[in-house]
């Protein structure tokens, strides 16, 4: 494992939840994302991504790669 990934204890401390499903829901509610998960349901999150999510939420980031995408429309109606 990379030392740059959040450990299970880090995820518990950040989210306030121990269960993986509750941590997943916390990320959905707090940041509007569905985090990547391992086969066992554990969240895979790097500290860099978490920091960028925090910056975006607080309005400190001007990162255009994380802006909302327009709704898709079907090509053939």
Image (spheres, rainbow, N blue to C red):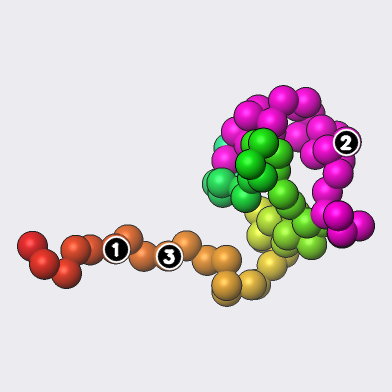
As drawn, the label of residue 9 is 2
Tell whether position 23 is magenta.
Answer: yes
As drawn, the label of residue 12 is none
Place residue 69 in its image quadrant.
Answer: bottom left
Q: N-terminal of the two: label 2 or label 1?
A: 2
Number of numbered discs on residues:
3
Place residue 61 in its image quadrant.
Answer: bottom right
Q: In which quarter of the image is the C terminus?
A: bottom left
Tell me: 60 left or right of 24. Answer: right
Per the model, the C-alpha gap separating discs 2 and 3 is 33 Å
Q: Pick out the residue farthest to the front.
A: 39
SS for callout 3: loop
Q: Measuring 87% from the left and 59% from the top, which residue is drawn there? A: 2
Region in magenta: 1-28
Q: Would you say residue 30 is visible in this rendering? A: no
Q: Would you say residue 22 is visible in this rendering? A: yes
Using the image, determine if residue 43 lies above or below residue 72.
above
**Which residue carries the number 3 mark?**
69
Q: Nearer the viewer, residue 27 or 39?
A: 39
């Amino acid at each position: 494992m990379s030392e740059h990934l959040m450990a299970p204890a880090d995820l518990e401390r950040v989210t306030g939840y121990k269960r993986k499903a509750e941590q997943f829901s916390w990320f959905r509610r707090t940041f509007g994302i569905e985090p990547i998960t391992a086969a066992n349901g554990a969240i895979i999150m790097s500290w860099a991504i978490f920091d960028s999510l925090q910056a975006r939420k607080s309005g400190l980031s001007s990162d255009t790669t994380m802006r909302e995408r327009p709704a898709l429309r079907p090509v053939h109606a």
